[in-house]
């Protein structure tokens, strides 16, 4: 199976921004896998790539009612800046149960829509 470089790049950016915002690699259970992907996204094995993309935001925001609206806004702004995007509308409904794959897919669709 082939995973394009852009998808890997966006996933890395998202995981990096989550780390910067929370000082966590998804909690102690996921930390090793996330750090491994962040360190080498283009050489990551498929199992590592898929493991990370299935993680939910609640791994980074373990408190009830997180991420807050402010945390989501900060995350989305930092992600757009990191990806050099302007005015990519954030997903309509996202929160603790949202997985990495959904956010990366949203960014990819926004890229396609802007062409």
Image (cartoon, rainbow, N blue to C red):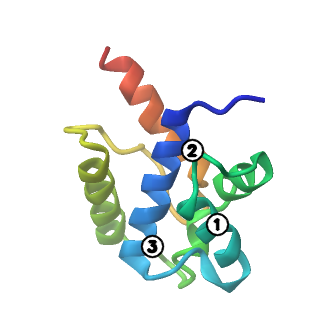
Which residue carries the number 2 mark? 102
Mark 1 vs mark 2: which is more N-terminal? 1
In which quadrant of the rendered image does the C terminus lie? top left
Q: In 3D space, how far apart are the residues under numbered discs 1 and 3 (Cα atoms)?
A: 13 Å
Q: Where residue 12 sits in the image (x, y, percent)?
A: 49, 54
On the image, numbered disc 1 is attached to which residue? 36
Q: Secondary structure at mark 1?
A: helix
The answer for how far apart the CA atoms under marks 1 and 2 are is 21 Å
Q: Is residue 29 above or below residue 108?
A: below
The residue at the point 59 percent across, 70 percent down is 35
| Residue at numbered disc 3 | 19
Image quarter of residue 26:
bottom right
Look at the numbered disc 3 and give the secondary structure of its residue.
helix
Residue 113 is at least partly visible in this image: yes
Which residue is depicted at the point 49% across and 77% down? 65
Q: Residues within 10 Å of mark 1 (few under 14, many from 20)?
A: some
Determine the residue positioned at 41% across, 20% down: 112
Above/below status of 78 relative to 35: above
Query: Residue 50 — which label?
Result: none
Q: CB under 8 Å between callouts 1 and 2?
A: no
Mark nearer the viewer, 1 or 2: 1
Q: Earlier in the sequence, mark 2 or mark 3?
A: 3
In front: label 2 or label 3: 3
Q: Position of residue 89 (x, y in %)?
A: 30, 39
Q: Residue at x 55, y 43 (%)?
A: 8
As drawn, the residue found furthest toward the top would be 115
Rendering quarter of residue 69: bottom left
For numbered disc 2, what is the local secondary structure? helix
| Circle 3 crowding by C-alpha within 10 Å: few under 14, some 14–19, many from 20 | some
């Amino acid at each position: 199976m082939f995973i394009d470089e852009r998808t890997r790049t966006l996933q890395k950016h998202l995981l990096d921004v989550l780390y910067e915002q929370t000082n966590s690699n998804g909690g102690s259970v996921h930390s090793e896998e996330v750090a491994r992907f962040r360190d080498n996204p283009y050489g990551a094995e498929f199992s590592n790539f898929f493991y990370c993309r299935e993680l939910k935001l609640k791994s980074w925001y373990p408190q009830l009612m997180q991420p807050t609206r402010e945390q989501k806004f900060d995350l989305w702004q930092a992600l757009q800046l990191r990806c050099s995007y302007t005015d990519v509308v954030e997903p309509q409904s996202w929160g603790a149960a949202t997985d990495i794959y959904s956010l990366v897919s949203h960014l990819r669709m926004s890229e396609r829509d802007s062409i």
